[in-house]
C-alpha cells in the first residue's frame, strides 16, 4: 500500500511530444496528494504565452534548481498500474505508445480531461474550419469531433484578396481549458494579422463557439484559471509575463485587466517561448521550450514557484533529447492527470516534411519536478529517452485514429463534409458542391488566378508517415481554356498532377512542380494525345515522408498506373506554409472563370 501511494504521488506522467516555435500542450489543474480523490469533472489548468506592453519593474531572476537528474534512476518497485473502475488484469489490454505516437502534423497541442474523455486542440494556421477539437479515451488514439470556428474573419486575409493571405499565420497554438465556475470550455489563440481571440462553448463536441476578440497580441497565448481569475501566461525574449483577462459580454471583447507584468526572467537560451502554466499541489509550474545559446537543440524546461505573482522561481531541464530514434529535440508541451490519478502529458518533435508530430513520454515526479522519459520493462525510469514502445496506465480504447479518411462524396443536401477535410483559407461557398452531381465534389472556378496558392476552394487533408498514397478520380468535362485541376502535394513548396485545358480546348494530363506562391514556368511532363472530352482520370501521389519525397502517377482504369513527371523533394518551412505536407484537391482558372472539375472519390492508403 505504501509503494502504491508513493507511486501515485509521484504521478507516472506521460507526455506526447511535438515540436515547433508555436506553442503547445496543456495540463489540467490538480493536487498531488496522498490518498486524494480525483474529481470526475473537467480539469481546469491552462497555459500559454502572452506579449502585451509589460510593466518593466522588478522581475525576479530564476534561481537554478539542484542538479538536473541525468542518470538512470532505480525505481523502488516497477510502476504499478493504477486501479481503474473496470480493472484490466491483462497488461496487453493497456494502450501502447509508439514513437512517434501520431505520425502526422498535429502541432502545438493542448489537452484537458472531462470525466473519462480527453480533448486536444492543435494549430491549423490558415485552414478552415479552424482549431480542431480531438477526442481520446486513452491518450493514444485520437478522433476529430469538432472545430472552434468555420471561418475566423471574413476579410481580405481570409478571402485572399487585395494581395493579402494568412499563409504561416491564421490561428496559432490554441490553449484549451475548462472553467468550473461557468461550466464553459475556453479556447484562446493569437492571430498575427488580427489579434487575440477567446472562444467559449458549453458543449465541446457538438456545440458552436462564442467569439471574443482583443486587438492586442498575445504570443502563443495560454490560459490559467486561478483563484477565480483568468490569466494569460507568455514567455519570449527571456521574460515570462502574466496578464489578467476578462470577457466583455456586451461587446464580445477580451479585456486586459491592468497591464502585463513580468514574473520571472531567464538567460542562456536562444529560443525561449511556448509557456504552459499549471497549479499542482503547492507549486505553480510553467513549462517552456528553449534551445541553448551555444547549440541548436529544442529542450523542455520547467519553472516553479509557490507564489504566482511575486514568488522566487526555480529552473530545471525536464527533457533534453530526441525520440523515436530521431535526434531532433522533443519539447513544448504540458501535463494532464487521468481520472485515476496518474499524470501524463504531450510534447512534439520536428519530423521534416510530415510536420510536427506528437509522442507520449512518461513523467516521473522527483522532488516535485515532473521529469520526463520512459520506464524500462524492469521498472527503471529512463530520463530523456523515448524510443522503445511503452504501455501507459489506461485501457486501450480500441478506436482508430480519425484525422484522415477516404471519401466518396456521397452527401445529403445541407450535410457537412467529413471533419478530416479543411479548406485552404475561407471557402467560396457558392462555388463548390457535393449535390449538383450526386456522389461527386464539384469545384467551380470563381476568378482568374496566377497559381495554386491564390485559388479558392482547394480542399485539403493531412498526410501520414512514414509512407502513404493519396488518390482521386477526376471528371474533366467542365474544364475550360486555361483551367488546371487535380491533386497537389503542398509542403515547403508544391508539386501537382492533374489535367489542364489549353487555348484550343484540348485537355492533357500534366505534372508540374514550383516554389511557394509562384506559377510553374513549364510542365515537367504532359501526355502526347488529348483526352476524350468527357474522360475520367485517376491521379495519385505516393509519399515517402521519412525520405522527404513524393512521386506522381495516373491511371485511366484505376488499376494500371503510370509514374509520371518528376519526383518532388518535400520540406518544411516556417516562412512558407508553416505546416506539414498536405494533399490538395484543386481547380483553378488562369484565363477565364466558370469552369469546373468533379472529383469522384478521395483515398488515403497508409
Image: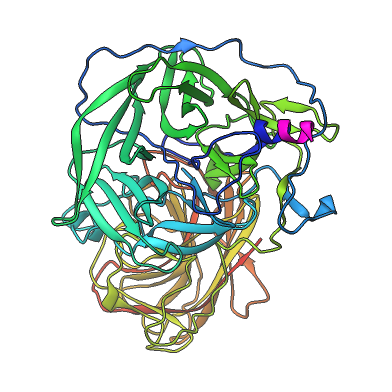
Which colour scheme appears in the figure?
Answer: rainbow
- Check the image and report above or below for 98 versus 250: above
- Left or right for 588, reference 421: left
Residue 478 location, quadrant: bottom left
- Check the image and report above or below for 602 versus 249: below
- Check the image and report above or below for 305 versus 582: above
Which of 374 and 354 lies nearest the eye of the viewer?
374
Which of 530 and 62 lies nearest the eye of the viewer?
62
In percent of width and height, residue 526 lies at: 48, 66
In percent of width and height, residue 180 lies at: 40, 51
- Check the image and report above or below for 561 versus 89: below
Q: Is residue 4 magenta?
A: yes
Q: Inspect this view and state whether residue 473 appears.
A: yes
- Left or right for 388, reference 259: right
Q: Is residue 412 magenta?
A: no
Q: Inspect this view and state whether residue 288 appears.
A: no
Which of 308 and 573 lies nearest the eye of the viewer?
308
In percent of width and height, residue 285 lies at: 47, 28
| Furthest residue in direction left, as rendered | 251
Magenta stretch in the rendered image: 1-6
Residue for point 52% across, 31% down: 281
Question: How many badges with numbers are in the image?
Answer: 0
Image quarter hosting the C terminus: bottom right
Which of 547 and 165 lies nearest the eye of the viewer?
165
Amino acid at each position: 500500500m505504501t509503494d502504491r501511494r508513493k507511486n501515485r504521488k509521484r504521478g507516472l506522467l506521460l507526455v506526447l511530444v511535438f515540436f515547433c516555435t508555436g506553442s503547445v500542450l496543456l495540463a489540467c489543474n490538480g493536487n498531488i496528494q496522498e490518498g486524494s480523490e480525483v474529481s470526475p469533472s473537467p480539469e481546469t489548468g491552462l497555459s500559454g504565452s502572452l506579449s502585451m506592453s509589460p510593466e518593466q519593474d522588478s522581475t525576479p531572476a530564476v534561481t537554478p534548481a539542484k542538479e538536473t537528474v541525468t542518470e538512470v534512476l532505480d525505481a523502488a518497485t516497477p510502476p504499478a498500474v493504477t486501479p481503474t473502475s473496470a480493472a484490466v488484469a491483462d497488461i496487453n489490454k493497456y494502450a501502447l505508445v509508439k514513437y512517434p505516437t501520431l505520425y502526422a502534423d498535429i502541432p502545438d497541442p493542448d489537452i484537458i480531461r472531462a470525466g473519462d474523455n480527453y480533448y486536444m486542440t492543435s494549430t491549423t494556421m490558415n485552414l478552415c474550419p479552424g482549431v480542431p477539437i480531438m477526442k481520446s479515451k486513452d491518450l493514444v488514439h485520437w478522433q476529430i469531433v469538432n472545430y472552434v470556428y468555420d471561418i475566423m474573419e471574413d476579410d481580405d486575409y481570409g478571402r485572399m484578396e487585395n494581395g493579402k493571405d494568412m499563409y504561416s499565420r491564421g490561428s496559432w497554438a490554441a490553449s484549451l481549458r475548462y472553467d468550473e465556475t461557468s461550466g464553459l470550455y475556453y479556447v484562446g489563440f493569437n492571430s498575427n494579422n488580427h489579434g487575440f481571440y477567446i472562444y467559449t462553448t458549453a458543449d465541446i463536441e457538438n456545440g458552436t463557439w462564442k467569439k471574443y476578440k482583443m486587438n492586442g497580441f498575445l504570443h502563443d497565448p495560454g490560459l490559467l484559471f486561478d483563484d477565480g481569475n483568468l490569466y494569460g501566461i507568455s514567455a519570449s525574449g527571456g521574460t515570462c509575463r502574466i496578464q489578467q483577462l476578462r470577457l466583455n459580454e456586451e461587446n464580445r471583447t477580451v479585456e486586459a485587466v491592468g497591464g502585463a507584468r513580468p514574473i520571472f526572467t531567464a538567460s542562456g537560451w536562444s529560443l525561449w517561448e511556448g509557456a504552459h502554466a499549471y497549479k499542482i499541489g503547492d507549486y505553480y509550474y510553467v513549462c517552456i521550450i528553449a534551445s541553448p545559446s551555444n547549440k541548436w537543440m529544442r529542450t523542455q524546461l520547467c519553472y516553479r514557484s509557490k507564489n504566482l505573482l511575486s514568488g522566487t522561481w526555480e529552473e530545471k531541464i525536464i527533457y533534453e533529447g530526441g525520440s523515436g530514434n530521431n535526434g531532433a529535440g522533443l519539447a513544448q508541451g504540458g501535463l494532464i492527470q487521468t481520472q485515476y490519478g496518474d499524470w501524463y502529458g504531450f510534447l512534439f518533435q520536428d519530423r521534416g516534411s510530415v510536420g510536427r508530430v506528437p509522442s507520449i513520454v512518461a513523467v516521473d515526479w522527483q522532488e516535485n519536478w515532473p521529469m520526463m522519459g520512459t520506464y524500462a520493462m524492469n521498472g527503471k525510469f529512463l530520463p530523456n529517452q523515448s524510443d522503445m514502445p511503452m504501455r501507459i496506465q489506461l485501457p486501450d480504447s480500441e478506436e482508430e485514429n480519425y484525422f484522415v479518411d477516404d471519401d466518396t462524396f456521397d452527401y445529403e443536401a445541407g450535410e457537412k463534409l467529413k471533419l478530416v477535410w479543411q479548406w485552404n483559407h475561407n471557402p467560396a461557398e457558392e462555388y463548390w458542391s457535393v449535390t449538383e452531381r450526386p456522389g461527386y465534389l464539384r469545384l467551380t472556378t470563381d476568378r482568374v488566378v496566377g497559381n495554386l496558392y491564390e485559388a479558392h476552394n482547394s480542399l485539403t487533408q493531412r498526410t501520414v508517415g512514414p509512407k502513404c498514397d493519396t488518390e482521386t478520380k477526376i471528371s474533366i468535362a467542365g474544364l475550360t481554356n486555361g483551367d488546371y485541376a487535380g491533386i497537389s502535394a503542398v509542403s515547403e513548396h508544391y508539386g501537382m498532377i492533374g489535367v489542364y485545358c489549353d487555348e484550343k480546348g484540348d485537355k492533357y494530363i500534366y505534372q508540374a512542380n514550383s516554389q511557394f506562391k509562384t506559377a510553374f514556368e513549364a510542365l515537367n511532363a504532359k501526355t502526347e494525345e488529348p483526352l476524350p472530352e468527357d474522360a475520367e482520370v485517376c491521379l495519385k501521389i505516393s509519399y515517402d515522408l521519412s525520405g522527404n519525397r513524393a512521386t506522381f502517377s495516373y491511371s485511366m482504369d484505376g488499376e494500371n498506373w503510370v509514374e509520371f513527371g518528376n519526383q518532388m523533394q518535400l520540406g518544411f518551412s516556417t516562412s512558407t506554409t508553416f505546416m506539414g505536407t498536405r494533399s490538395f484537391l484543386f481547380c483553378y482558372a488562369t484565363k477565364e472563370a466558370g469552369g469546373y472539375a468533379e472529383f469522384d472519390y478521395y483515398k488515403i492508403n497508409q
